[in-house]
Amino acid sequence: MSRRPVRRFLPDPLDRRIAALAVPALGTLAVEPLYVATDTAIVGHLGTEPLAGLAVASQILVLLASLANFLAYGTTQRLAHLRGAGRQRDASHAGTQALWLAAGLGTLAAVVIAVAARPLASLIGAQGPALEHAVTYLRISSLALPAVLLTIACHGILRAELRLGGLLVVVVVANLVNLVVELVFVNVLHLGIAGSAWSTVIAQVGSVLAYLALVRRTVAPALGWPRWSVMRPLLDVGAVLVLRVGALMATFTIATAIAARIDPPTLAAHQIIGSLFILFALCLDALAVPTQTLVAEAIGADDTPLAARVAKRSLRLSIGAGLVLGMALAASAPWVGRLFSNDHAVVSRASGGVLVLAVLLVPGAAAFAVDGILIGAGQFRALSHMMLVVLVVFIGCATVPILVPASGVIGIWGALAVWMLGRAFLGVRWCQRYLWVSPGPSDPIDHFM
């Protein structure tokens, strides 16, 4: 197939490289969101109460996975920086210790979730039958948490080396297995939400074995026991990012809690919109994955002008992608809710929220790009500080759906849209001040800012 149309649409070679890497990068981001989306679509047809229970359980599991994302962020930045500086052996040591840390934290998390499933689900706002469904899903899902965290660490290693092609195969196979097994467990064996959870566990455990095989050649030169001196830098990154992830997930947890206290249809509609947000966000975030590595490598090689150029091009591409995806989502608003539920009350609430989500994707695209730039630059503290600031902004906006429950999902996602706009604004300002300070050739994104 001719490459001329691609070259015409993306004339800059760096744009083409980022876009080409973004396609397989989607695989590194798609694992957990696709599991949640599949579960949402299948469980949604079991009824409103099981879907509401899944909304609460998935919020807790996504929170946990997000807290563990430092295993990917820190590993990618550290390995890419070391590789850029020519320190391959040190990069192998860092990758090995990331896997040890992931295995230990995953085991601890499994115990905590299994024991505390009921109080955690109650804290989010689940009640009655929805609470029972949430507890069932959480306790079964806890069995796969070590595999989930190991998967995150493997993603960090493979992103640092830009070895992303094999990940797409693993993701496609794992999600097909999850879909087929879940359809059998739920619709044939009638195991309900428990069948949904078991199918995801099977897919997660199977896929992590494939990921470990992919990273073997990287970690093999440095296999050994856990070493505190090598793990500590990654833990330091984790300690800083806990504030960021805590603020990020507090935002969505508050949003879910507000929806849960309005009524079950609103909570179910919020779950549908949240699943769509995750799916579209991972498409945009795929552009930020190669940015993390390319910026870190450039800085490791002491080439700041190249790092700045990568950052600008990534932001430009992301904003364009956000506009396209936002328009596509807006066009689907009248019918997309029917893919997840047969309840008219749920579908009608979801339609309005989807329109708000479509608008949110444009500033979201800029925010995700800036996250990739900051991660590549090792500016984890700046990420955390910005997220704390916009959390305060969101809490202020969230008073609208709290005081006016009739605003429903539109009020909730309107507050999230303002929150995302704040993230984009603060992130771009940071790049202007600290990364794009040296004079250079004019770039189209300069006019946007």
Image (cartoon, grey):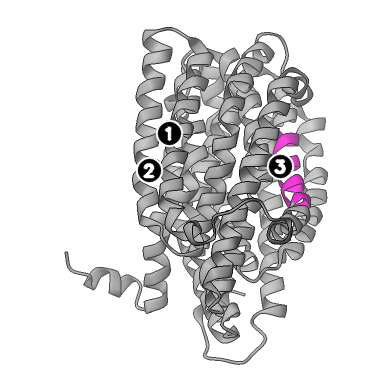
252 within the magenta span: yes
Image coordinates of residue 377 in percent, x first then y, are 64, 71
In this view, 187 is above or below 158? above
**Which of the 4 quarters of the picture holds residue 268?**
top right
Disc with the residue nearer the chain's start (3 vs 2): 2
Image coordinates of residue 292 in percent, x first then y, are 55, 66
Left or right of 224, for residue 338 = left
Instruction: Indicate the secondary structure of the residue bearing disc 3.
Output: helix
Quadrant placement of the C terminus: bottom right
The residue singled out by tag 1 in the image is 206
Specify few, some or many for label 2: CA neighbours under 10 Å numbering under 14, 14-19, or 20 or more: many
Q: What numbered label is drawn on residue 170?
A: 2
Q: Residue at x 83, y 45 (%)?
A: 396
Disc with the residue nearer the chain's start (2 vs 1): 2
Of marks 1 and 3, the one in the foreground: 1
Image coordinates of residue 383 in percent, x first then y, are 72, 61
In this view, 176 is above or below 47? below
Highlighted magenta segment, given as a residue range: 242-255
Q: Is residue 315 visible?
A: no
Query: Which residue is the extreme one toward the front?
Result: 224
Specify few, some or many for label 1: CA neighbours under 10 Å numbering under 14, 14-19, or 20 or more: some
Q: Residue at x 62, y 47 (%)?
A: 100
**Which of the 4 quarters of the picture holds residue 2?**
bottom left
Disc with the residue nearer the chain's start (1 vs 3): 1
Image coordinates of residue 195 in percent, x first then y, are 48, 15
430 within the magenta span: no
What's the magenta bit mostly, secondary-structure-wise? helix
Of marks 2 and 1, the one in the foreground: 1
